[in-house]
Image (cartoon, rainbow, N blue to C red):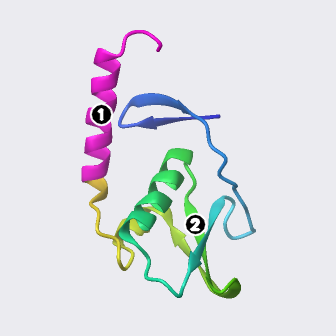
């Protein structure tokens, strides 16, 4: 489990995300991407949210076709909303997440 803060709302999160490192990148996630299909906008959002919540600064996207690696690209987490094909506004996503967490905090007062 890891703890994170989203716009001053503290959370304890469980994750199975693997974190890798190199001399140049002390922490990065790894994502596989089938290059025979277009990258869906929701996929980029998923990469960004996973890294944001786990405080991982970079993602290595490994492109493959039929399981054969074609190459990879290391992208800063903060740059994912501007990646080709990404169609989400990171500020709007964070605003919506904060509103949802505020609602849950105010209305969910007991377990279950």
Residue 77, given in percent of the width and then of the height, sits at 48, 62
Q: Which residue is drawn at 34% across and 71% down?
A: 86
* Circle 1 Cα neighbour tier, 10 Å, few/some/many (<14 / 14–19 / ≥20): few
Q: What residue is rendered at 29% in x and 16% in y?
A: 107
Q: Where 17 sits versus 64, above or below?
A: above
What percent of the width, then of the height, locates residue 75?
52, 72
Check disc 2 and report the residue beneath it.
Answer: 59
Q: Nearer the viewer, residue 65 or 17?
A: 65
Distance from the alpha carbon under mark 2 to that under mark 1: 26 Å
Above or below, comparing residue 87 to residue 50 in the picture: below
35, 7: nearer the viewer:
35
Q: Which residue is drawn at 50% across and 67% down?
A: 76
Instruction: For the residues labelled 2 and 1, say whether their Cβ atoms are less than 8 Å apart.
Output: no
* Residue stretch rendered in magenta on the structure: 92-112
Q: In which quarter of the image is the N terminus?
A: top right
| Residue 12 shown left or right of residue 85 in the figure | right
When asked about the image quadrant of residue 81, the answer is: bottom left
Q: Name the residue under label 1.
A: 100
Q: Is 48 on the left or on the right of 25, as rendered?
A: left
Q: Look at the image and say whether residue 83 sits in the magenta stretch.
A: no
């Amino acid at each position: 489990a890891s703890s994170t803060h989203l716009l001053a709302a503290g959370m304890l999160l469980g994750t199975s995300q693997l974190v890798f490192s190199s001399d140049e990148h002390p922490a990065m996630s790894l994502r596989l991407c089938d290059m025979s299909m277009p990258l869906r906008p929701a996929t980029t959002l998923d990469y960004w949210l996973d890294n944001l919540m786990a405080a991982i600064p970079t993602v290595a996207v490994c492109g493959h076709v039929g399981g054969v690696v074609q190459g990879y690209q290391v992208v800063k987490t903060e740059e994912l909303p501007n990646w080709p094909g990404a169609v989400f506004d990171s500020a709007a996503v964070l605003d919506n997440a904060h509103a949802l967490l505020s609602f849950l905090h105010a209305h969910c007062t007991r377990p279950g």
